Image: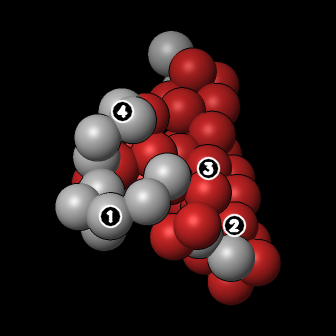
């Protein structure tokens, strides 16, 4: 799930055609932000438990 946001967006040749910005729209962006929030919440919860 997160792989779609890591390698293709990070490397210039991550997509077969065109630059990365042409492959991501507002839906992808909002999903990526939501995933980032979930990861951050998980990490913060884990830190609070220690």
Which residue is under mark 1? 17
In-front residue for pair 16/30: 16
Kindly indicate whether the residue at mark 1 contacts the one at mark 2 (C-beta within 8 angstroms).
Answer: no
Which residue is under mark 3? 36
Q: Secondary structure at mark 1?
A: loop
Query: Looking at the image, is mark 1 or mark 4 earlier in the sequence?
Result: 4
List x then y, in percent, for residue 41.
65, 46
Query: Looking at the image, is mark 2 or mark 1 earlier in the sequence?
Result: 1
Per the model, the C-alpha gap separating discs 1 and 4 is 13 Å
Q: Nearer the viewer, mark 1 or mark 3?
A: 1
Which residue is under mark 2? 29
Name the residue: 45% across, 46% down.
Answer: 9
20 above or below 31? above
43 above or below 20? above
Which residue is under mark 4? 11
* Quarter occupied by the N terminus: bottom left
Per the model, the C-alpha gap separating discs 4 and 3 is 19 Å
List x then y, in percent, for residue 2.
36, 57
Q: Secondary structure at mark 3?
A: helix
In-front residue for pair 46/39: 39
Q: Nearer the viewer, mark 4 or mark 2?
A: 4
Q: Nearer the viewer, mark 2 or mark 3?
A: 2
Farthest left residue in view: 16
Q: Nearer the viewer, mark 2 or mark 1?
A: 1
Per the model, the C-alpha gap separating discs 4 and 2 is 17 Å
């Amino acid at each position: 799930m997160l792989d779609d946001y890591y390698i293709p967006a990070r490397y210039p040749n991550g997509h077969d055609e065109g630059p990365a910005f042409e492959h991501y729209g507002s839906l992808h962006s909002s999903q990526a932000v939501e995933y980032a929030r979930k990861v951050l919440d998980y990490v913060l919860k884990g830190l609070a438990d220690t």
